[in-house]
Amino acid sequence: MGTNNFLTISSKWEYVLPPSRPTVYELQRIESTVSLFDKKKPVAVLGSTIEFRTLLNRLGFQDIYIFEKNIDFYKWTCEWCAYGVENERVIEGDWCNTISLFIEKFQFVLSDLTMGNIEYGKRNKFYNDISNSLQYGGLFIDKVLTNEKRLISLREIGGKYRNLPINLETVNMFNCEALFGSELLEGGIINTTDFYEVLRETYKNDKVLTKFVEKCHLITPEGCVWYYGVAWEKLRNDYFAYYRSSTAIDDIEGSPYYGRTKQFVNIK
């Protein structure tokens, strides 16, 4: 998920797979959307998302702003970047404080699953600040966990995963569904310490499910908080308020986030 929250140990990011990171389809869609933009004018990325930075460098963008709270994580991600970082400018600090410093600066801003890092009460201002940072006609391309599909019961999750092999792919799927798409979100906040306590208790008599809960810590540690669970219907107005049009694309069928995430292309 958003890279500014849970990477207390940065190397855990190596275990995180799409769709909790940008997928090939999403990257292809971004490439087709931005490839004709002026390569010399500034563009921005919320967080240190490796895939976005590699794509932008491959396309030849020369002035890439990286908004990152955790500078140590940024340095670690550079080990995974195929290109040098000479085209990147790191803006260190809380996004809610830093993005507002840039007015009509960027052709586009890229974001992947960052909404949950922003407290509900700060979102209207935050998305206004992002809009203000864009040039007229600029784009905010953002993947959002909207969870418009019914939240999954822990009983359903147990029935599914007790019959699956335990590997990195299925543990990532379990992470998406149990921590970010289940009935545990009904309170409106993800607190991973509390969620893991419930999962351990719920699945304590099943060895396979207990192992899934254990290995899920490789993807998402305890001690983290995200602001997810409030119905998208109550959040969408603040999100869309500052754009003249938006296009939404669902995740692909078969993804653990199918019906739960959308990639938005918002036009100022």
Image (cartoon, grey):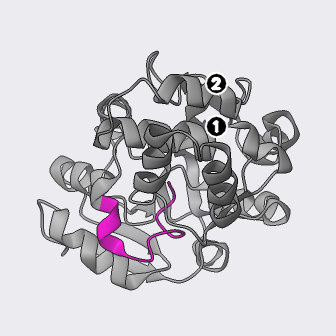
Q: Can you tell which of label 1 and label 2 is closer to the viewer?
A: 2
Does 28 appear in magenta? no
Location of residue 151 with respect to 230 vertically, above or below: above
Label 1 Cα neighbours within 10 Å, binned few <14 / some 14-19 / many ≥20: many
The residue lying toward the viewer, choosing from 121 and 8, is 8
What residue type is disc 1 on? Gly
**Does 11 appear above or below 28?**
below
- Check the image and report above or below for 49 versus 24: below
Secondary structure of residue under mark 2: helix
Asked if labels 2 and 1 touch by Cβ distance under 8 angstroms, the answer is no
* Residue depicted at 40% across the width and 70% down the height: 66
Q: Residue at x 56, y 68 (%)?
A: 222
Q: Residue at x 70, y 53 (%)?
A: 198
Q: Position of residue 27 (x, y in %)?
A: 32, 37
Residue pointed to by mark 2: 156
Q: At which x and y percent is residue 191?
A: 69, 62
Residue 93's spot in the image, x, y percent?
54, 83
Give the residues in magenta.
1-13
Q: Which residue is mark 1?
A: 181
State the residue in front, 139 or 12: 12
Dot placed on the residue nearer the N-terminal end, 1 or 2: 2
Q: Is residue 55 left or right of residue 232?
A: left
- Magenta segment, prevailing SS (helix, strand or loop): loop
Residue type at mark 2 is Glu
Image coords of residue 189 (percent x, y): 77, 56
Extreme-front residue of the structure: 205
Q: CA distance from mark 1 to mark 2?
A: 12 Å
Q: Is residue 87 visible?
A: no
Q: Quadrant of the C terminus?
A: top right
217 shown above or below 158: below
Q: Nearer the viewer, residue 183 or 254?
A: 183
